[in-house]
Image: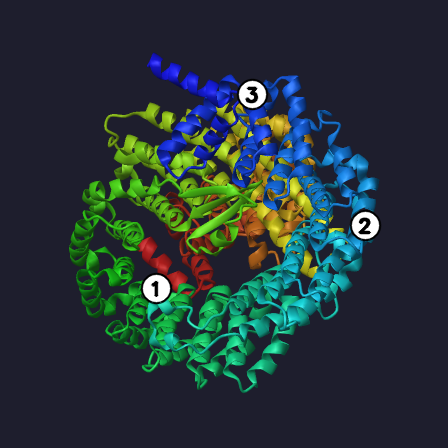
Amino acid sequence: MASDQLQQQAQLAMVLGSDTAPFETLISHLMSSSNEQRSSAEALFNLAKQTNPDTLALKLAHLLQLSPHPEARAMAAVLLRKLLTRDDAYLWPRLSLPTQSSLKSSMLSCIQREEAKSISKKICDTVSELASGILPENGWPELLPFVFQCVSSDSSKLQESAFLIVAQLSQYVGETLTPHIKHLHGVFLQCLTSESASSDVKIAALNAVISFVQCLSNSNERDRFQDVLPAMIRTLTESLNNGNEATAQEALELLIELAGTEPRFLRRQLLDIVGSMLQIAEAESLEESTRHLAVEFLVTLAEARERAPGMVRKLPQFIDRLFAVLMKMLEDVEDDPAWYSAETEDEDAGETSNYSMGQECLDRLAIALGGNTIVPVAYQQFSAYLVASEWQKHHASLIALAQIAEGCSKVMIKNLEQVVSMILSQFQSPHPRVRWAAINAIGQLSTDLGPDLQNQHHEIVLPALAAAMDDLQNPRVQAHAASAVLNFSENCTPEILAPYLDGIVSKLLVLLQNGKQMVQEGALTALASVADSSQEHFQKYYDVVMPYLKTILMNATDKSKRMLRAKSMECISLVGMAVGKDKFKEDARQVMEVLMSLQGTEMEADDPITSYMLQAWARLCKCLGQDFLPYMDVVMPPLLQSAQLKPDVTITSADSENEAEDSDDESMETIILGDKRIGIKTSVLEEKATACNMLCCYADELKEGFFPWIDQVALTLVPLLKFYFHEEVRRAAVSAMPELMRSAKLAIEKGEAQGRDLSYLKQLSDYIIPNMLEALHKEPDTEICVSMLEAINECLQISGNLLDEGKIRSIVDEVKQVMTASSSRKRERGERANAEDFDAEEGELIKEENEQEEEIFDQVGEILGTLVKTFKALFLPFFDELSSYLTPMWGRDKTAEERRIAICIFDDVAEQCRDAAFKYYDTYLPFVLEACNDESPEVRQAAVYGLGVCAEFGGSVFKPLVGEALSRLNVVIQQPNARQSENAMAYDNAVSAVGKICLFHRDSIDSSQVLPAWLNCLPLSNDVIEAKVVHDQLCSMVERQDVDLLGPNNQYLPKIITVFAEVLTGKDVVTQETAGRMVNILRQLQQTLPPSALGSIWSTLKPEQQHALQSMLSS
């Protein structure tokens, strides 16, 4: 061991000695393709870094300056950059001052001396990296004067390097450049307008000015560069005029970045810029990639609506011309013979890069600008295209229609009949590709415009799809018709599907026996979806369908048929779920035998069966319930393995040369984080997401039966709450948390928890809840935030008072954070609404985004309600802390939903904390009284319910308010359409609140007036919870023979008997116990009242009520 160290020391001394050759050899070994050679070189280099940082740094600088070998100089620049990057291995602070000084000057001289452009760029990267660490503390005062000197030199190479450094410093430490704004403005303008500057220098200057404009924090500073903008655009147009498309493409890429981040900077010259871009996009003489970049610029500008809402909508002809360009791109499709053979690998046969670009951009444009803007333009262009003779134009219209449906759904739903007839007319086209495109459009619209499309047009769409399945000459058309049946049925009720099932199922069975695998696969997925959507209506087809499906499952063993077999699993399990356990259980056993034997075999990484099998097992579990438990030992190990898959990640620098190859690889998803490009294998993520969802399904279905797996699953899923590579994984992990806790609690309660008690549940809850709060704090997606809050609330309900004070504190702190973040997002949207181009379309989009924020507040209200119900008065100190967050929600400037949530929280506090809540009455009751007459029925309901609570528990504190409360409640009850559906819940709660005032504050009211009026409002039928309370109260008052209720000479008795009759024959508006007491009262009245009196009351009832009461009284 000691001799190894001595040997390494000797090597190190030689490498760092005065002879340069050993050091050059070390550097060349670091680039070696031999792993062994490279590893030993890395070990020696790292030792030098630890023990001799000064010598190492100076050696690298010397090599960079003087080595005759370009690859050695390039490597030295890269290694220096790594040593000077501020991370764990940051070397700069460990270097002596003389070394630091020497490094700085030698790097600047390298910039001057280096001739090779690629190495020069690497040196600039190293300089910028070091500068970003030391420039803010004025650690390199020579750098900026050097850069400005290079910019004004005669050397193109030096100018280019200087602009590159300015661009990088703008990104890293822009604030160090802003004091030089005036000088930089002059430099940029001079270079971009210069006749003599080379195109490379101009591109470097364009890059620098765009980076600098992006780093400026206020619009006044940015506006100083408005006069540079024409010159920036001229860089693009000049290079095109000179036939230099490569330079033009570089310029376009830089301008696209500007359009995405600072669209307002372009506003004053928007017409000219957009005009130039449209000309480029329309110029068929230019290279495709140049035109595509111009289109990308225009679409990016349309998408940048958060920064410049509505700006491009106002441009004359912009949408018409851009839409026309995209339509023209869609026409670029070839009639490739491979398309007709319907082999799966030829799925995109005939599609060109123009066609793909057109498709993608139409989708994005429609989402960015919305239906009111896009639909009129689209329909106008479609009508011209659909009367043309070329099939490509018909095909283009149908593809475009499918692409814009998602972004234009609200507007298209209004013209649904026109859209559907336009598509269905193309089902008769003589060209198979047009018929395919028409089917494709119906499939897409079934998803984007469902369920309206299904509800309104099933009688024409389903027969058309069924007919398309008969197109024997064109198997691809048949397969696509089956796929469209799948899309259609996914948004369809069993009642709508039922009349068509005979025809559809028989046709799908014919397709299942077709020779083409694509057709069989399409038929299988369609059958699965039809079974899933028709549920018990599918029973009658089971005996015919299941043998076919089992045959495929047993016999499709060839590698080329993997997907067919996978889809047969999906279909079998969905059919099983549709028909239910009794019908399916015999076949289920056989199917599970096949799955078990498959699970024991080694599968290839890309085998689709793995993922389909995970889902099939979970559906079989849902169908069989507790009978599935014996199979869990087989199912769980591979499922956990899939859920624990590590993402297959490759990390490169964001500006790395191999970016283009990565971005074309469809199996990889690319995310840019800072200056890193992260590529992730999507199949791994999808399998992981599926597995996580299935774990959630098992816990949900098996309840206490899932107990043995809770620990393993919790340890797998809890860390995935922060799995930022894939939303679906996080969603599944979130959904599983309450299921795991519920499973544990039920197992403990039923004595099936392997001897564990509530301390186990506390331990689980103490692991899950803090991790959920931490994940919520970092969650970037609003929708997932809502799901997290919902899941946290469920966990709190399950763990109940097992939570200690520390956990409550962290929940309350996170609630504050969530409310603050949500409010600030709403405020930012409010600022967008003040932008000069803001329009109605943008207002609609903001409204939708704000609705998600309301869901957040709603869930916060639920959590606070749960905490109040669980801890009652013990929670009030936390409630006091939150009051500064809650009180603003009562304001008239807030939405109805926010006001409702705030009132509900007070209602919970008053109901659960009773006397301890009296101190809040003065603050909150004035709001509640005012809210009784709010224009929103939901707010009114919460407010009148609150008055009922305060009447019940408020005692003497509420007494002074009884008069005002009654008059407010009276307004709600007397409203002309008080009992119409949208107001009915508020009405029932107001009547209930009056009942509570009668019960608890009789001495403060004129009971001879109020009680008969209250009785007149009965029975209640909408809010069944309140109805049960009120009807029980009525029953008790009759039992006590309440004089005010019965009235003088029992004059209100007929009304009371009528109410009893309606309640007893009504739907779920009375508890069994109260109903029994009501029947006893009626029996007593039968014996005490004269028959004539009872007969006249009886005659006012409906015949069916009379009949039902007779049988109750006689039983």
Identify the residue shown where x is 28% and y is 33%.
Answer: 747
Q: Name the residue under label 1.
A: 529
The residues tagged by marks 1 and 3 sit, at their Cα atoms, a distance apart of 70 Å
Q: Nearer the viewer, residue 353 or 1051?
A: 353
**Residue 334 falls left or right of residue 494:** right
Quick check: can you spot residue 976? no
Location of residue 132 with respect to 823 vertically, above or below:
above
Q: Mark 2 Cα within 10 Å, few/some/many (few <14, many 20+)? A: some
Q: Nearer the viewer, mark 1 or mark 3?
A: 3
Q: Mark 3 Cα within 10 Å, few/some/many (few <14, many 20+)? A: some
Q: Which of 463 and 57 is in front in this view?
A: 57
Q: Which amino acid does label 3 sit on?
A: Thr
Label of residue 189 in the image? 2
* Outermost residue, top side: 2
Q: Mark 1 Cα within 10 Å, few/some/many (few <14, many 20+)? A: many
Instruction: Tell me whether the residue at label 1 lies in contact with that at label 3, contact meaning CB atoms closer than 8 angstroms.
Output: no
Location of residue 190 with respect to 723 vertically, above or below:
below
**Residue 944 falls left or right of residue 775:** right
Q: Which amino acid does label 2 sit on?
A: Leu
Could you tell me which quadrant the N terminus lies in?
A: top left
Quick check: can you spot residue 1066? yes
The residues tagged by marks 1 and 2 sit, at their Cα atoms, a distance apart of 62 Å
N-terminal-most mark, 3 or 2: 3
N-terminal-most mark, 1 or 2: 2
Residue 156 spot, x, y in % from top left: 72, 47
Residue 266 spot, x, y in % from top left: 75, 55
Secondary structure at badge 3 equals helix
Q: Nearer the viewer, mark 3 or mark 2?
A: 3
Identify the residue shown where x is 46% and y is 59%.
Answer: 1097
Color encoding of the figure: rainbow
**Residue 242 falls left or right of residue 63:** right
